[in-house]
Image: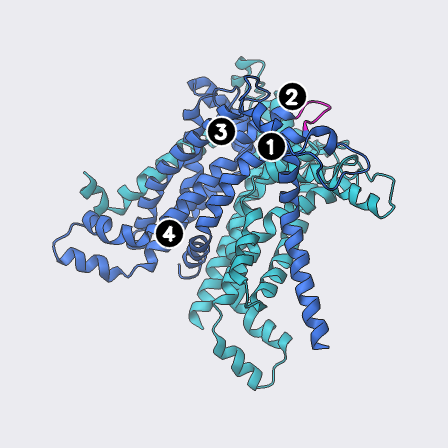
Chain colours: A cyan, B blue
Amino acid sequence: MVRKIFRSPVMLIMPSILAIGFVIIIPLIFSFYTSFTSYKLTRPDSLFNFVGLRNYERLIDNAKFWYAFGRTILFLAVVLNLELLFGLGIALLINKITWGQRTLRTIMMFPMMFSPILVGFQWKYIFNDNIGLLNNFLYLFGYESAIPWLIDKYLAMGSIMVAEIWANTSIFAILLLAGLLGIPRDPIEAARVDGCNSWQVFKNITLPFLMPFVFIALTIRSLDVGRAYDIVHIMTGGGPAMRTELLWTMIARIGYKDANMGFANAMSYVSIILSIAFTYYFFTKLVAARRDLGQQ
Amino acid sequence: MKQIKKIGFWFLVLFLLILICLPGIWIFVSAFRPNPEILAKPANWIPDRWTLHQFTQMFSINGYVSVPAFKYLMNSVIISSVSTVIAITIGMMGGYAFARFNFKGKNKIFLSLMLARAVPGISLSLPLFILFAKVGIINTSFGVILVYVAMNVPFTIWLTDGFFRQIPKEMSEVARTDGCTRFQAFWNVELPLAGPGIGAAAIFAFLLSWNEYALASILTRTVHSKTLPIGMMDYLDEFTINWAGMCAIAVVMIIPALILTFIVQKHLVSGLTFGGVKG
C-alpha cells in the first residue's frame, strides 16, 4: 500500500488536496452560493431564498463598505511598505555586526511568534490612555494630559499600524538578512575596485540579489494579511465610530452580530479576492526574480 | 568621527533591541504584579510586590477558578499537536512529490495550494460555521483540528519541498539500485537527512495552530473546546479589563512559543529561503 503511494506523485499529493478541498474549497463554494441568497442565521429557511445579485448591488451602493475597503488598502499599503523598509534597515544593520550576530537574530525572531491576538492585547495595554506604558512614560517628562491613543479618531489607526508593524517587520528582517549573508563577496569587491561608492554597490549588486528574498518575504506575508483582524478586533473592535473598521472586522460584524450571512459572504468574497490577488502577484514576481537570478 | 559613528551605530542597535523586547517584558512583569499596582497613577515603575495570585487563580490551586486556564491550555496542546502531526505527515508527502517528481501542472498545483492558504480566516469562518453546525462538529476539538490541518498543509509543502531539494537526488537513486523500494529509500535515506528541516516545519505548524484566533473564536463556543487565545478574551469584559490576569494568560501562551522558536530558528530560515530561491 505505502509502496504504491510512493510510486506516484498523484497519490502523494492527494491527501493534501483532499484536506484543502474539504476545509477550504467546499466551504467556499457553499459561501459563494449563499452570497446570492438573503440567508440570515436567525431564519434558516432563507438559505433557499435566491436573490440574484442583490447582495453585490447593495455592496456597491454601501458607502461604509467602500470606506472599509479603501481603509484596508491604505492600511496594507502603509504597513507592508514600512515593514519592508524597516526590515531592510534592520537586516543591513545586523549584517554589519560581527560579534553577537546570532543572538541578535534570535531575539529578532520573537515578535514573529507572538499570536496576533497577543500583539493586539500587548499594544492595547501600552496605548491605554490611563495606565498605558506610553502615557505613563510621557507623564515622566511632564506631559500630564493623557493622550487617547485608541480613542481618538486619527490616532487609533496609527496605533494599530504600529502594532502590526512591530509584529511583522521581523519576517522581512530575518529573510533579507539570510539573503544578505548569501551574497557572494567577489562582485562587490570587483565593483569597489572599479570605483563604485557604497550606494552604487547597494543599488546595482546588493538590491538585485536581494529581490528574490524580498518577494519570498512578501509572499509569506501576503498569506497572513487577514490576521490583522485579530489585532484590530482586540485593540479597538473597529471603533471609534468605525474609524478603524477594516474589511475583515466589517465581515465579522455583519455576519455574526447582525446575523446577515448572505451579505457578509458577498463581502468576504471581496476580501478573498484581495488576499489571493496579493499572494498571486508576489508569487509570480518571486518566480520571475528567481529566473532572472538563474540566468545571470 | 569614526568613534562617533561607532557609538551611534551601537546606540541604534540598543534602541532596536528595546523596541523589540520591551512590550513583551512589560507584559511579563505585569503578570506578577497585583492589579492595584498596575493601575496606580502616577505609574509605579519598580514593582514593590510580586505575586503569583493570577496564576494560582487560573490554575485553581486554592480551589477557586477565575478563568479555567488549565482546560484551555490542555485544549490548545491537544488541538495544536494532533493537527501538527497530521499536517506534517500529509504535507511531507506532498513536499516530497513536488521535490522529486515531474508531473503535468506541477507549478499550477503548487500555486493553487498556496492560494488556498491565502483565504483570510474570518472569511472562511462564515461558511465553516454554518457547515460545521449542520454536520454537528461545531464546538468540538475535532472540527478545529480538521481546519488547522488544512491551513498548515500548504506551508508545510513549501518548507519540506525546499528541504528535500537540498538532498542530492543521487542518494535515493543509489539506495534504489541497491534494491530499496522508493519508500524504503525515502524512509531510510531522505527522511533522516531532511529530519531537522521537517522538525522546523512541524514547529511552525504547531505555532500557527497555537496562535490562531479568527477561526477558533467562531468554531469554539465553550470551555469544552476553547483554546488559549480565545480563553484570553474571558478577561475582557464590556467595560473593564483584568489587566494582570490577561498578562498572566499571555505569559502562559507565549512561553511555549518562545521556547519552540528558539529551537527552530536556524532551520526555519534556510527552509524558507532555499525553497524559494532554488525552486
Note whether B109 is above or below B14 in the view shown: above
Using the rendered image of the protein, determine whether residue A207 is visible from the camera's viewpoint.
yes
Note whether B192 is above or below B10 in the view shown: above
| Chain of the residue displaying label 2 | A
- Residue A31 position within the rendered picture, expressed as x and y whole percent measured from the top left: 51, 28
Q: Which residue is mark 3?
A: B73
Q: CA distance from mark 2 to mark 1?
A: 33 Å
Query: Residue visible at 43% across and 25% down?
Result: B141
Amino acid type at image mark 1? Ala
Identify the element where label 3 is drawn: helix
Identify the element where label 1 is drawn: helix
Extent of the magenta region: B236-242
Q: Which residue is mark 2?
A: A258
Q: Which quadrant of the figure has residue B202?
A: top left
Q: CA distance from mark 3 to mark 1?
A: 13 Å
Query: Alpha-carbon neighbours of circle 2 within 10 Å: few (<14), some, or many (≥20)?
Result: few
Q: Which residue is mark 4?
A: B197
Amino acid type at image mark 2? Asp
Q: Which residue is mark 1?
A: B248
Same chain under badges 3 and 1? The reply is yes
Q: Quadrant of the N terminus of chain A?
A: top left
| Chain of the residue displaying label 3 | B
Q: Which quadrant of the figure has residue A16?
A: top left
